[in-house]
Image (cartoon, rainbow, N blue to C red):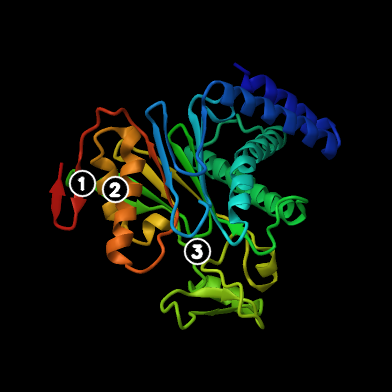
Amino acid sequence: MVQFSSIFEGLARSVSSKPRNVKNDEGREAVELLAGEAKKNHLILRCPGVTSARSNGNASVFSRKGEKGINQDCLTVWEEFGCQEDMTFCGIFDGHGPLGHFVAKFVSKLLPSMLLRNWQEILAVHSLEHDIDVELNQLAKDAQEFHIWKQTYLRTCSVIDQELKHHPRVDSFDSGTTALAIVKQGELLTVANVGDSRAVLATMGESGNLVPIQLTIDFKPNLPEEEERIVLSKGRVFCSQDEPGVYRLWQPNKATPGLALSRALGDHCMKDFGLISEPEVTQRHITNRDQFAILATDGVWDVISNEEAVQIVSSAPKREKSAKMLVKRAAHAWKSKRPGVAVDDISAICMFFHSSSTSYHVQTGHKSIK
């Protein structure tokens, strides 16, 4: 297997001594080598379309095509991310617009590798400038780690959005994608979210029941801070008559397109009117109480609550079937809760933290079920 330390040391030297274009070339080659090794060793799962997969018992993924045409959802799981045994990347991408499936596929393949490359570069710079191995209290170390990861995500999403804008074969003028990513590094979760896909953590409550903790914000245009930015950029936020309750971002003098989210990669026709590609980045230390995380597109969350999702996943007879169970239950819920509305694409990743022998109850309202 490729040794991460040797690649990192070479990258650190290139950061300190070589021009940026040479450094980027070497960094890209190093990450491509890592990705190739991971793919060869079956450590990368990619899930465009209808498929089910298992990743060493720690992750379950499933995607189901809706009734609106081609499936525009993409999912990626990369274990031993960057050849680090204690690191896992999970990402889910929900495309929209006429060419959203191309945008989501492009981003799902590019983001993990670019994220890794940028993380290595930023980490190398911090190592050289600040000597990150010096004795620091835990609070300072946590703050430094968060700063490095936040800068990594911000740079990665900004660069990808620009690459989409100028890509000769992927037209993202009026098409785009959400991007929700989690990197698990030992007991540290770093979460970055662009758009309205959602991550939910299942943790053990004081009474011994599983309870959900929402890790991300659904970035809808009518959120006060989002709407304020949009209005200042001359964009408009309102519901059309045929979609009561569905707030969209609109251009100032056009009836289309209207976006039901306030952040996205792509959709460059809307970037002058308040749409941004900047992710919200947060971190959380995993404890023994935290059991698993669910990453899912809005095809799940439009009809399934956080509590229901945790209950469904925890009740799966086998972990590798958990994402499929959640997606199938969501598809059934669309028929009963939103009759007459075309079913959306529905996709989910279930990321488990501990051994499969863990047992727990699930809190659903005032009841608990085993």
Q: Please name whichever residue, 169 or 20, is drawn nearer the observer in this view of the structure.
A: 169
Label 3: which secondary element: loop
Residue located farthest toward the right when viewing the structure as drawn: 19
- Work out whether mark 2 precedes mark 1 in sequence or the reverse, and give the earlier one: 2
Q: Please name whichever residue, 8 or 319, is drawn nearer the observer in this view of the structure.
A: 319
Look at 32% across and 67% down and name the residue there. Answer: 339
Circle 1 sits on which residue? 362
Query: Where in the figure is residue 219, as x and y percent of width and height?
Result: 50, 64
Circle 2 sits on which residue? 310
Question: Contact (CB < 8 A) between labels 3 and 1?
Answer: no
Q: How crowded is mark 1: few (under 14 residues within 10 Å), some or many (20 or more)?
A: many
Q: Can residue 194 be seen in this view?
A: yes
Residue 270 versus residue 40 in the image, above or below: below
Q: In which quarter of the image is the N terminus?
A: top right
Residue 226 versus residue 194 in the image, above or below: below
Q: Residues within 10 Å of mark 2 (few under 14, many from 20)?
A: many
The disc at residue 219 is: 3
Q: Quadrant of the C terminus?
A: top left
